[in-house]
Amino acid sequence: MRFRLRPRRAAQSTPQPAAVPAVRTERALVALAIHSQQLDERLARMEHRLEVLASDERDLDLPTQDDLLEVRLHSARVSAELTQVAVELQARIDDLAVRMPAVVAEDRRQRRARTLAETIIDLSDSLDTTPVDLDGQQGDWAATA
């Protein structure tokens, strides 16, 4: 298959040499104008934000000596309440400790018995016993610890 070549039109396709740099310069100037406008808008927004922040700072009241004393008094009250709660909690713990020694001792005995039972089970599992050992014949021991 052959493609036909289209004849080139010399008048329309060849740009004038002086017009090409002018178009490029024009595009560059438009791009610079757009960028400068964007920068100007950003600067205006930043200036507005700074003005708002400055006006907010002027409206703030600085703490006075009375405010400081009020905060200190409040923290002292909270500290006193916390100390009182800690003392009450310690008293409750002491009361329960006096009532519960028998329960605690029983729990210790149960833990010791459980530990002993586990040790006996472990030892019995480690012994190697065969049916020949159970026949009652005297001879070499097959059980090992």
Image (tube, rainbow, N blue to C red):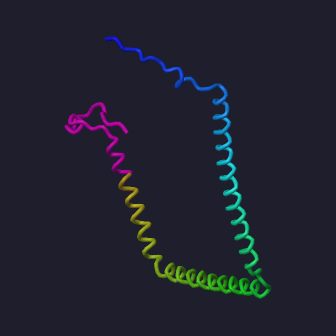
Q: Residue at x 73, y 74 (%)?
A: 55
- Image quarter (top left, top right, bottom left or bottom right) of the N terminus: top left
Horizontally, is 14 left or right of 116 in the view? right
What is the quadrant of residue 24 in the picture?
Answer: top right
Rendered location of residue 52, percent (x, y): 70, 71
* Rendered-image quadrant of the C terminus: top left
Q: Is residue 81 left or right of residue 137?
A: right
Foreground residue among 11 and 120: 11
Q: Nearer the viewer, residue 76 or 103?
A: 76
22 versus 65 height, above or below: above
User: Does residue 35 lie above or below 60 as drawn?
Assistant: above
| Nearest the eye: 11 or 40 | 11
Question: Which x, y percent locates residue 8?
Answer: 48, 19
Q: Residue furthest toward the top?
A: 2
Q: Is 136 contained in the magenta span?
A: yes
- Residue at point 70%, 61% (across, down): 44
Q: Percent x, y for residue 50? A: 73, 66
Q: Indicate whether residue 34 is drawn in magenta.
A: no
Q: Position of residue 113 (x, y in %)?
A: 38, 61
Q: How many marks?
A: 0
**69 left or right of 9 in image:** right
Image quarter of residue 140? top left
Q: Point out the stretch of residues depicted in magenta.
A: 119-145
Q: Is residue 6 above or below residue 93?
A: above
Q: Residue at x 34, y 11 (%)?
A: 2
Q: Extreme front residue here?
A: 11
